[in-house]
């Protein structure tokens, strides 16, 4: 239930009447003669009357604007209260429906409880199909479980500084299987706990829960749901469990007499005892492709959805008017002490990467509005320029993948085309390339000292370049697809590389910048003269978005890894400082990245 409160009327400067001029402040300029003094008095009176009439006109305009603004505010406040009352009426109606054990109301109520859960791990899937048997007081639901990829194949990772590589120790198959079974059992118990804990109306006598993953049946090869766990849990039995002390697998299989796949990592299925479609009532599904496509959503509806998300997160939030909003789409107020305060929110329903200028504009809006924080929400993603500018500022960037996850975690619905709900066992569909032609960054590199350097770039997967053609240097000025190319440098830079981060090959997860002594110009030089180096991140208009400091060179070293941009799971790119040096020059360095040198 939302409080029936709206922000009070705040007319701002319009609340202050226009000050009227005081004739005592209009001194007549004296003269040597009586006639001149009389004329000065007339002139003073004329100035006063002119200013007084102007003030009267300004005051009338202020009162007219104040009345108009008050009418607009009242219309807005009435609409906000009406929306709150509609929402609260819907909540009351739903709650009453649960008490009456109406099947649709019960399914909607407990689905919302699962989606609002803060205990369900971030990044785990949220998809449910449910039906309610009112006669038996039983909720029957299929709930999606995480795939085996949730348990890392690596047991440990050790960074080898000398090779600038991460060495993984593999996890034994039996250990990975045991951990995955433990995760599935814990997920099943957590879902049961969340459902029974939310049952204040007393609608659940029992719950039949079937846990599934999306994948391919290993026996038929056909895609579909594979059930890895199932249980029918009576409320009277479940409430007597001490979950903090139980072994999850034993509790599920023995205490609750459920079934758990012996080899879930190989998708060995179990047979569900009862499915939602067996109940006979309408099956309600959430989290599937029935979710609204955020790309196709009406812009105003999208803003309202973002405002709903902030309200679901415990904040007060309202959408702004379409005009004169000052670059703000949603006004939010976090009531939490110390860390809370006013938040301004902008939403960008984009398919292409959000330009850094949008982040800079948001920062200006935060300062102008006197807000504690600015949040930029988009259906697409952010490039390194945006992250570099936002770093250290009261700004938060929420890309599309995180937005969908937040919506699902707080009981709201949304997907990004066909890509936000896909199985881990199936490849992601290719999103049409709608990038603008100027969707790229220029990396300008500068340093002090007169040492002559070649600056090169490698497009890599891990510590291996994709191919020799993906090594950009003086004899190969660009990659085959043109996403990376060397440019003539302009002052103050001594070298420049152009890169379209979001157009890099899908298999690329690193973009590495290196520098090496030019042996033809300075055959005896080393990198001890390479100091005060930095990388300037520039937009297509050569506007500086940020600076990335890099390590100085060291004596006897003739090649150096400046740093690498690394692709995050949500598609954004972060910069990681390098520093590894080589005494064997560029030849030794590129061998480390898998390039054969004759």
Image: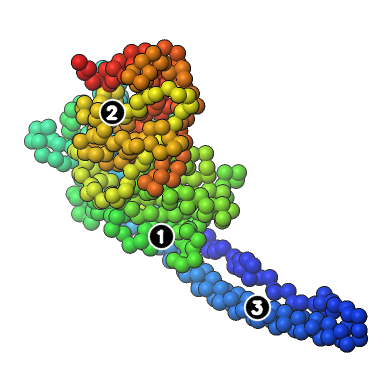
Report the residue at 18% width, 40% height from top.
Answer: 225
Q: How crowded is the residue under tag 1: few (<14 C-alpha within 10 Å), some, or many (20+)?
A: some
Q: CA distance from mark 2 to mark 3?
A: 68 Å
Identify which residue, 269 or 255, lies in the foreground: 269
Q: CA distance from mark 2 to mark 1?
A: 52 Å
Q: Which of the two marks, 3 or 1, is nearer to us in this view?
A: 3
On residue 137, the disc is none
Q: Secondary structure at mark 2?
A: loop
Q: According to the image, label 3 marks what residue?
A: 58
Q: Quadrant of the C terminus?
A: top left
When the figure is inspected, residue 206 is found, relative to residue 318, above or below; the finding is above
Q: According to the image, label 2 marks what residue?
A: 474
On residue 304, the disc is 1
Report the residue at 56% width, 63% height from top.
Answer: 7
Q: Earlier in the sequence, mark 2 or mark 1?
A: 1
Q: CA distance from mark 3 to mark 1?
A: 38 Å
């Amino acid at each position: 239930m939302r409080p029936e409160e709206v922000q009070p009327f705040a007319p701002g400067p319009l609340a202050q009447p226009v000050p009227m001029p005081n004739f005592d402040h209009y001194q007549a300029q004296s003269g040597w003669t009586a006639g001149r003094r009389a004329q000065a008095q007339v002139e003073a009176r004329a100035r006063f009357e002119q200013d007084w009439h102007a003030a009267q006109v300004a005051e009338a305009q202020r009162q007219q604007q104040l009345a108009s603004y008050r009418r607009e505010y009242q219309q807005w406040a009435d609409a906000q209260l009406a929306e709150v009352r509609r929402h609260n009426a819907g909540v009351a109606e739903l709650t009453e429906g649960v008490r009456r054990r109406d099947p649709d109301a019960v399914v909607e109520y407990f689905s919302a409880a699962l989606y609002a859960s803060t205990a369900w791990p971030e990044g785990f899937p949220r998809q449910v199909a449910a039906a309610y048997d009112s006669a038996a007081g039983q909720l029957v639901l299929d709930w999606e479980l995480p795939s085996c990829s949730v348990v890392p194949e690596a047991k440990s990772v050790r960074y080898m500084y000398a090779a600038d590589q991460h060495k993984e120790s593999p996890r034994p198959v039996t250990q990975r299987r045991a951990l995955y079974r433990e995760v599935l059992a814990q997920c099943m118990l957590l879902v049961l706990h969340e459902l029974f804990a939310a049952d204040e109306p007393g609608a659940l006598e029992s719950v039949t829960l079937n846990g599934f993953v999306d994948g391919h049946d290993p026996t038929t090869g056909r895609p579909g749901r594979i059930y890895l766990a199932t249980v029918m849990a009576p409320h009277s039995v479940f409430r007597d469990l001490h979950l903090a002390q139980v072994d999850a697998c034993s509790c599920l299989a023995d205490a609750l007499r459920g079934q758990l796949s012996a080899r879930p990592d190989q998708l060995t299925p179990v047979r569900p005892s009862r499915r939602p479609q067996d109940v006979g009532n309408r099956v309600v599904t959430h989290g599937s492709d029935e979710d609204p496509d955020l790309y196709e959503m009406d812009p105003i509806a999208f803003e309202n959805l973002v405002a709903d998300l902030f309200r679901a997160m415990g904040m007060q939030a309202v959408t702004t008017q379409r005009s004169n909003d000052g670059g703000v789409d949603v006004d939010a107020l976090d009531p939490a002490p110390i860390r809370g305060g006013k938040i301004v929110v902008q939403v960008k329903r984009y398919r292409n990467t959000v330009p850094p200028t949008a982040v800079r504009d948001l920062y200006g809006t935060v300062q102008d509005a006197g807000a504690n924080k600015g949040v930029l929400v988009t259906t697409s993603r952010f490039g390194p320029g945006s992250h570099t500018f936002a770093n250290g500022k009261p700004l938060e960037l929420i890309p599309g993948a995180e937005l969908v996850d937040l919506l699902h975690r707080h009981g709201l619905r949304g997907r990004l085309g066909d890509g936000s709900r896909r199985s881990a066992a199936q490849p992601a569909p290719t999103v049409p390339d709608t990038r603008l032609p100027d969707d790229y960054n220029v990396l300008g590199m500068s340093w002090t000292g007169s040492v002559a350097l070649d600056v090169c770039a490698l497009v890599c997967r891990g510590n291996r370049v994709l191919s020799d053609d993906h090594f950009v240097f003086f004899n190969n000025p660009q990659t085959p697809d043109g996403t990376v190319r060397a440019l003539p440098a302009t002052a103050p830079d001594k070298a420049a590389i152009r890169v379209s981060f979001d157009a890099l090959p899908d298999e690329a997860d690193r973009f590495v910048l290196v520098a090496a002594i030019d042996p033809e110009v300075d055959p005896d030089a080393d990198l001890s003269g390479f100091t005060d180096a930095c990388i300037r991140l520039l937009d297509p208009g050569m506007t500086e978005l940020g600076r990335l400091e890099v390590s100085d060179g060291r004596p006897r070293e003739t090649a150096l890894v400046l740093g690498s941009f690394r692709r995050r799971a949500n598609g954004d790119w972060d910069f990681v400082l390098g520093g590894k040096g080589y005494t064997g020059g560029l030849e030794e360095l590129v061998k480390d990245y898998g390039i054969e040198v004759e």
